[in-house]
Amino acid sequence: MNTNPFDDDKLREECGVFGVWQADAAAALVALGLHALQHRGQEAAGITSWDGHHFHSHRAMGHVAGNFDRDEVIRGLPGRVAAGHVRYATTGDTVLRNVQPLYADLASGGFAVAHNGNISNAIKLRHDLVRRGSIFQSTSDTEVIIHLVATSTYRTLIDKFVDALRQVEGAYSLVCMTPEGMIACRDPLGVRPLVMGKLGDSTIFASETVALDVVGAEFEREIDPGEIVIVTESGIKSLKPFPAIHARPCIFEHVYFSRPDSIVAGSSVYDVRKAIGAQLAIESPVDADLVIPVPDSGTPAAIGYAQQSGIPFELGIIRSHYVGRTFIQPGDQVRHLGVKLKHNANRALIAGKRVILVDDSIVRGTTSLKIVQMMRDAGAAEVHMRIASPPTRHSCYYGVDTPERTKLLAHKLDVGGMTDFIHADSLAFVSIDGLYKALGEARRADVRPQYCDACFTGDYPTRLTDQEDLPVTDQFEMLAERAL
Ligand code: AMP
């Protein structure tokens, strides 16, 4: 029985957020911004606007293009204030009611929220709220925030908002709209990114700087971990209402998740990925004829590997850009087909060559297995796999979709076993220290890690309440049974 009141498989989502305060055609700008953030979530998209009197909302399954490139949709989202969201949730239960921004009429007026991250105590909070009478409209963890704001006994909306967030564990980069203003906020660990920019006199919030570039906005600064920025008619205010803690931004944003043309934490994602590739070449050299990226996510690291090793970089795998990411195909069978659709060997180049394949990560191992075989079918003499991250041994509970732990190849097998599984002549991963080095920060043992690297180390920066708290799930099972 499904005892999880949220999506049935898991809670985790990948998302991007974008907000515009006081610009003409705000919704059209949001559509452009979301387009640039499409890699953060391809399953659904939504935009909410405020025209000074009313909120308007359009939410749809599918890509931004196709939903928000139509005049009549944008015309239906009038006003100079708008926020949007792209989302990828992992289950069949991806119904429209879960598509963000989520909206509610609170005592203070309308309140819309777009969330990137994942609340790691959402089940427990939801359980408590339901017991106190809250009626949930969606199965999204984000809705917990709305109910906590709605039921807070503090007086002002901002105080209610802070009160709500003090109860929340995990990762949240939020862009919220109220009739008075726009609120952007990053959790105290700063797990997910959130930046602020200027477009003339307008204020823009975005998950990544690439979205600022696309609308022609100037990057101003990152929202600090634990910071709440409030923009109203009377100006911009910054609050830091949470106890200061050691920030732990997600390391996987640099490895895979963010677009290479974004600047995250002051570093070019592209440069960092090249540096990881170079570090990989130093740590795990191999005699070969070609360095070949697994496109597109392995490309910057492969360039770094090739430059460091002096082995020529070549495009030995050509990717079709008309297929979504392999990883997001539901079900193992379709995923398997998706890989074939997506990548093809450049046979003329490969035959008789010793090749080094570079990819950013191995999750289930599906991609690596297929691509190594593809190289062998194309006549490669040797196939060596190099991975620009440490083995992914642990699931993410903070907003990057990963399968449950038992499905992670590196959880099941050591590097030798993984080498056999993917049928490579050799396989190596960059070390965690090497990864930190490439990020420009030596990993000092006496300092807690500067990033959330839990997917590689298992060192989660928060309690995983919903994972630990089995009795709560049991209670839900009881409740569900009683309801039958
Ligand atoms: P797998 O085939 O399951 O081993 O997945 C590895 C491939 O998926 C790599 O090529 C990565 O670029 C990509 N990947 C890794 N993590 C994610 C993620 N969270 N979402 C989508 N794709 C991912």
Image: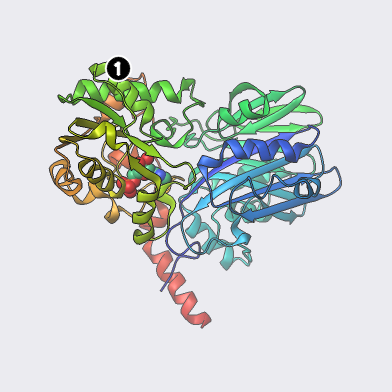
Left or right for 44, reference 332: right
* Quarter in which the N terminus is drawn: bottom left
Graded by Cα atoms within 10 Å as few (under 14), some (14 to 19) or many (20 or more), the crowding at tag 1 reads: some
At x 23%, y 46%, the residue is 373
- Residue displayed at 65% across by 47% down: 113
**Up-down relation of residue 231 to residue 82 (above or below):** above
Q: Amino acid at mark 1?
A: Gln
Image location of residue 411, percent across then percent down: 23, 49
Q: Is mark 1 within 8 Å of ligand 1?
A: no
Q: Please give left or right for residue 443 compared with residue 5 in the image.
A: left
Residue 104, position as x, y percentages in the image: 71, 55
The image position of residue 217, as x and y in percent, is 67, 24
Relative depth, front residue between 310 and 453: 310
**Is residue 386 something one can see in this rendering?**
no
Can residue 59 be seen in the rendering of this structure?
yes
- In this rendering, the answer to whether 359 lies above or below 478 is above
The residue wearing badge 1 is 307
- Asked whether 33 or 355 is in front, the reply is 355
Where does ligand 1 appear, by image quarter? top left
Image height check: is 219 above or below 149? above
- Scheme of colours in the image: rainbow
